[in-house]
Image (cartoon, helix red, strand yellow):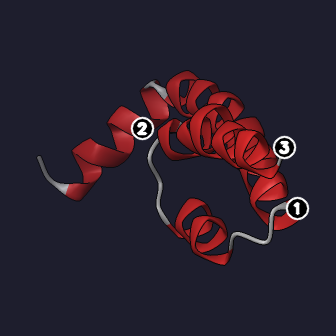
Amino acid sequence: MNITESLNYIQQHSWMLWLILLWVVPWKGYGLWKAAQNKDQIWFVAILVLNTLGILPIIYIFFINKNKKVKNK
Protein backbone atom coordinates (compact mmCIF):
# COMPACT_ATOMS: atom_id res chain seq x y z
CA MET A 1 0.00 0.00 0.00
CA ASN A 2 1.58 3.26 -1.08
CA ILE A 3 0.97 6.71 0.38
CA THR A 4 -1.77 7.59 -2.10
CA GLU A 5 -3.74 4.45 -1.29
CA SER A 6 -3.30 5.11 2.42
CA LEU A 7 -4.58 8.67 2.11
CA ASN A 8 -7.54 7.51 0.03
CA TYR A 9 -8.39 4.89 2.64
CA ILE A 10 -8.25 7.46 5.42
CA GLN A 11 -10.37 9.86 3.42
CA GLN A 12 -12.99 7.19 2.70
CA HIS A 13 -13.11 6.05 6.32
CA SER A 14 -12.79 9.37 8.12
CA TRP A 15 -15.82 8.53 10.26
CA MET A 16 -13.69 5.88 11.99
CA LEU A 17 -11.13 8.50 12.96
CA TRP A 18 -13.87 10.68 14.44
CA LEU A 19 -15.28 7.70 16.34
CA ILE A 20 -11.85 6.88 17.75
CA LEU A 21 -11.31 10.53 18.74
CA LEU A 22 -14.69 10.65 20.48
CA TRP A 23 -13.68 7.56 22.47
CA VAL A 24 -10.06 8.47 23.28
CA VAL A 25 -10.19 12.17 24.14
CA PRO A 26 -12.61 11.99 27.09
CA TRP A 27 -10.83 8.99 28.62
CA LYS A 28 -7.42 10.56 28.17
CA GLY A 29 -8.59 13.88 29.58
CA TYR A 30 -10.22 12.32 32.64
CA GLY A 31 -7.23 10.03 33.22
CA LEU A 32 -4.82 12.96 33.02
CA TRP A 33 -6.99 14.98 35.39
CA LYS A 34 -7.11 12.16 37.96
CA ALA A 35 -3.35 11.51 37.69
CA ALA A 36 -2.64 15.22 38.19
CA GLN A 37 -4.94 15.35 41.23
CA ASN A 38 -3.14 12.36 42.76
CA LYS A 39 0.28 13.78 41.83
CA ASP A 40 1.12 10.59 39.90
CA GLN A 41 3.79 11.97 37.59
CA ILE A 42 4.65 8.61 36.00
CA TRP A 43 1.01 7.83 35.20
CA PHE A 44 0.44 11.36 33.93
CA VAL A 45 3.34 11.12 31.48
CA ALA A 46 2.39 7.57 30.43
CA ILE A 47 -1.22 8.56 29.70
CA LEU A 48 -0.08 11.71 27.90
CA VAL A 49 2.56 10.05 25.71
CA LEU A 50 1.23 6.55 24.99
CA ASN A 51 -1.67 6.16 22.60
CA THR A 52 -3.50 3.04 23.74
CA LEU A 53 -7.01 3.86 22.47
CA GLY A 54 -8.15 4.70 25.98
CA ILE A 55 -7.02 1.47 27.63
CA LEU A 56 -4.31 3.00 29.84
CA PRO A 57 -6.55 5.80 31.20
CA ILE A 58 -9.33 3.28 31.90
CA ILE A 59 -6.89 1.07 33.84
CA TYR A 60 -5.72 4.07 35.85
CA ILE A 61 -9.21 5.41 36.56
CA PHE A 62 -10.86 2.14 37.56
CA PHE A 63 -8.00 0.19 39.15
CA ILE A 64 -5.00 2.30 40.19
CA ASN A 65 -7.01 5.33 41.36
CA LYS A 66 -9.41 3.16 43.40
CA ASN A 67 -6.52 1.30 45.06
CA LYS A 68 -5.03 4.62 46.19
CA LYS A 69 -8.38 5.69 47.69
CA VAL A 70 -8.61 2.44 49.68
CA LYS A 71 -5.04 2.80 50.99
CA ASN A 72 -5.64 6.41 52.05
CA LYS A 73 -8.68 5.51 54.19
Residue 30 versus residue 65: which sits nearer the camera? 65
Residue situated furthest front in the rendering: 73
Q: Quadrant of the C terminus?
A: top right
Please tell me whether residue 15 is drawn above or below residue 53 in the rendered image. above
Q: Please name the residue that numbered disc 2 is placed on.
A: 10
Q: Residues within 10 Å of mark 1 (few under 14, many from 20)?
A: few
Which is closer to the viewer, label 1 or label 2?
A: 1
Q: Please name the residue that numbered disc 3 is placed on.
A: 73
Q: Tag 1: residue type?
A: Gln
Q: Please name the residue that numbered disc 1 is placed on.
A: 37
Please tell me whether residue 45 is drawn above or below residue 35 in the rendered image. below
N-terminal label among 1 and 2: 2
Which residue is at a point 37% across and 47% down the rendered structure image? 7
Tell me the distance, in whole angstroms, between the alpha carbons under discs 1 and 3. 17 Å
Please provide percent x and percent y for residue 48.
62, 66
Q: Tag 2: residue type?
A: Ile
Tell me the SS state at disc 2. helix
Residue 23, image quadrant: top right
N-terminal label among 3 and 2: 2
Tell me the SS state at disc 1. helix
Q: Tag 3: residue type?
A: Lys
